[in-house]
Amino acid sequence: MSGAMSIISMIPYTYVERKIKRTQKVTIQHSKDMCLYADSIETQNDCFHINDVFDISYKCVSKDSGFLYLHTNQGMFAYTIQTDPSAFITAYKNIKTKG
């Protein structure tokens, strides 16, 4: 965790959790933040060192949602987002070019 480092950019992402409660199937949508720091990108469950992230791309799937892809040395990770990721991607690219 980057703890003392300040957040350079942040983008909210959502994920769906499906549970069976008694006889019902329950779907819960969670919203979390992906945070970009000078040395890492952090999500609820993952932390990627900035040097391990090769690229970030975005694919729009509907008028108000799409997938943000982190291309890393551990594979590709997809996150569902409902906001324009251009500022986040630009901030990431700025860090990589300075790096």
Image: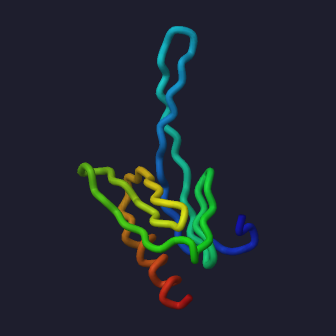
Question: What colour-coding does the image apply?
Answer: rainbow
48 horizontally vs 55: left or right:
right
Residue 20, quarter of the rendered image: top right
Relative placement, left or right, of 66 versus 75 is left
**Residue appearing at x 29%, y 50% in the figure:** 64
Which quadrant: the N terminus?
bottom right
Q: Position of residue 27 (x, y in %)?
A: 47, 27
Query: Does residue 7 appear to the left or right of 31 in the view shown?
Result: right
Q: Which residue lies furthest to the bottom in this view?
A: 98
Residue drawn at x 39%, y 65% is 85
Foreground of the two, 88 or 79: 79
Residue 44: percent from the left, percent from the top?
61, 51
Residue 37: x percent and y percent?
61, 73
| Residue at far right of view | 4
Q: Residue at x 40, y 59 (%)?
A: 68
Is residue 66 toward the left or the right of residue 73 in the image?
left
